[in-house]
Amino acid sequence: MSSATPLLEVEGLRKSFAGVHAVDNMSFSVARNTITGIIGPNGSGKSTTIDCISGFQRPNAGRIRLDGRDITRLTPQKIAKAGLIRTFQTVHIYESMTLRENLLQAARPFQAAGWVADFLRLPGMRREVDAAMVRADELVDMIGLRKYYDAPTRILSYGQKKLVALAAGLMPKPRLLVLDEPVAGVNPTRIREVEEVILNLHAAGESFIIVEHNVEFVMRLCERVIVFVGGSKMTEGDPKSVQQDARVLEAYLGIPA
Amino acid sequence: MRMPLLAIIVVAVAALLPLVVSSSYILSVGVTMFLYLVAAMSLNVIYGLLGLLSLAHIAFWGIGGYFTVIAVMDLGLSFWVALPLAGLFAGVLSIAVGFPALRLNRHSFVVVTLIFALLTTLVARDWVSLTRGPMGIPGIPSPYFFGHEIAGAYSFYYLSGLFALISLLLLYLFFTSRIADTMRAINQSEDLARSQGVNPTAYKLLAFFLSAFFTAMAGGILAFNQRVIDPLIFDFFFMQAFLIMVIVGGRGSFVGVLVAGAVMSILPEVLRFSVDLRMVLYGLALLAFVTWAPNGLAGWIREKREERLRSELRQ
Amino acid sequence: MDYIYFLQLTANGLVIGLIYALIAVGLALLFGVLGIVNFAHGELLLIGAYAMAIALPAFGLAYIPGVIVAVLTAIIAGWFIYEAFLSKLGHGEFERSILITMGLSIVILNGIQYIFTATPLLVNTEFGYAGVNIGDIRVAWTRIAAAVLSAVTFAALYILLNYTQIGRAMRAVSQNRDAALMVGMQPRKIGRNAVILAASLCGLAGAAVAPVQLVQPYLGQFLVFKAFAIIIIGGMGSIEGAVFAAIALGVIESWIGGFFPVVWQEAAGFIIMITVLMLKPSGLFSRGGMRVG
């Protein structure tokens, strides 16, 4: 695909629950190699939109394209395989597995080795495991949790678990990583670490969508910000202009225009 | 690397036992233990790894028995062909039942698997032309191995022992494989697994197939050992026994269930209680473990290890 | 077709259906309020049945005192089970509730078998085998008593659930647990009430069944699996569904048993259940979204 094609295109997305429109006529696009932020007050449809584009909810209407390919009605696992990986607002992690195992598991479905190769421990499988180990090693150092590499993730703090979820999302080298509130509930020092990680990865060519309530975080990190209100896009632009947009201030902070 | 050595010693002892012991009672306890171990470990795959409490497990145990017997006695197949065929039949059937059952929510899933088990009991009792009804099928012939008749405690001990050895070995390889890791992942967070590209249904159906496959063959050997099969093979007693072994040993743990299964097969015989009292004790054991140690012995060991690790990492 | 025969079948079916309903409603109640599937439900009935069998001779075969003893015994058993085990379960621990109630079922069933042996008991009441003729149909007094008992119970249950605080609290928790907790309802008290209510229904069912069928240790198991099928058909937390499906099943089973081989009678419940599951998996009466499975 040419680099002119947007990485992600969302057109006319609509999703309602029991008559309430959580998302109504949502359209936006995301270019490759960018960090795009999505902000908006509670109930503006951020999480529902993420669920729809990652296949966890079926949209009632609209189209979603990843690198030109229509992924609207695909199952979450197919969308993941297509290159769109997402994290969860409430941190999802394999609690009884070690940090290392969590990372390796995240890469497994993307490897070519099937059940037979796994069961017979064929050489091809072993090579893939080794490659995954290398990547996991890099990532665990990147999130600074090497000390807990072989501990069950159950014992980690909330913020640490969020970092692990981030690293796991990166294991399969996704085309687009969608982070759902990656720093909510994380203490401020860690937030800086997360920023660095994301910036480094961006420099290496990774694309991100970051949904966040932490407006400062988004403004510092993102090249472009989309503002959701009432289930649709209110405005978008670079951080500075969005910050100065009176409508955004009103919607978000309650400061009248 | 103590484990492999320990395993070899245990297998050697088990293999040499009949040469030392002359009591056929002890050998028959051994037969029961071998077959129960395979059935319990198979349950460990669906319930232990994936957390699916499928009460249909007992159905495949009985279906394996009936299929093997009918295939040999009515269709004239050799025992050595009928047995794996029974396994395949049960496996395919488990997928046919599992596929719609998995669509239901957790509660309905359990009840529906239960109903399936009851249905098979019904069929065994009432489809008389196929299963000879409530009286069952007596006079099951002995299998022949290259002209050598397999009959009596001694031969069945080796038959079931060899079957258990191979099955448990294969199951061990499975439990330590990445497929099992993915199953454990699905059990802990199905959403996370899906967001990582895993198709949970495929894994669940695989688990169904494997557990039904091995359990059915165990049931088949049981039938030939008893020389008679009747609808009592579907008795819930077996389901409860296998469940207790999995829970006491620790869901998802191979070694835990292996040890618990062996102990719980042998112990009641050693203690010589009446059947009813034995079951009461089983029930109390189940209650005790589910209430205070739901992750079984293996889980308890793991928790202790984690506590130690936690305190170490704090420093 | 023999009209009289058909009416006779229907009458019998109604009686059985009412007993099924007593069992199924208790099961639905426990599922709705506590979120558990009670595998020991049949054993609560068993306790009621055996209590009835023992109490009757002590009271000179008088029916009502026997029933009262049966219900009280079942209530005591249910109360103990709740305090000792069920109250300790968290709300989402569904599989654990199955295992615990399964364990209880094993202990009770085999305990009773150990004490009373597996020999079936023939239970006699003051009514003996006497019956009444309604037109050309004959109905035994024991069956009439069972039907009356059930009908009165359902009337009382209706009043309880719709017009009393206790009942409305149970319905509230059943419909939306979080909301109920938020307005200050106490789960432990409501759970206990639900268990006592369900246990008394089982005790009643046991007392009603004892004179009608042979009492043996597996009586509970046989009936409770029917009840499982019934609540699936009716919708797992739905009381109205349980009553409707139970009575319908009792009557349908009776009709089938009257004209076809016994096999089909037993299979009827399961076949209906499978059909319902394929067409409307949440059950006939469920509102969908009542319980997040």
Image: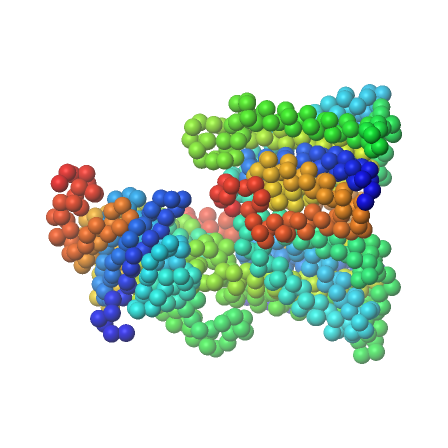
Furthest residue toward bottom: B146
Q: Say which quarter of the image contains residue C14.
A: top right
Residue drawn at (27%, 66%), measured in percent from left and top? A7
In this view, B168 is above or below B144: above
Give the image location of residue B30, x and y in percent. Answer: 75, 60
Residue drawn at (78%, 51%), measured in percent from left and top? C263
In this view, B297 is above or below A133: above
Give the image location of residue A238, x and y in percent. Answer: 15, 56
Residue A106 shows in this picture: no
Residue drawn at (64%, 38%), measured in percent from left and top? C244
Q: Quadrant of the N terminus of chain B?
A: bottom right
Residue drawn at (29%, 59%), measured in percent from left and top? A11
Q: Which scheme is used to colour this image of the protein?
A: rainbow
Give the image location of residue C77, x and y in percent. Answer: 68, 30
In this view, A52 is above or below B73: above
Give the image location of residue A122, x and y in percent. Answer: 50, 76
Q: Nearer the viewer, residue C183 or A119?
A: C183
Q: Is residue A123 left or right of residue C58?
A: left
Q: Nearer the viewer, residue B51 or C226?
A: C226
Q: How many numbered badges does the structure rendering display?
A: 0
Q: Is residue C200 left or right of residue C260?
A: left
Residue C202 shows in this picture: yes
Q: Nearer the viewer, residue C93 or A255?
A: A255
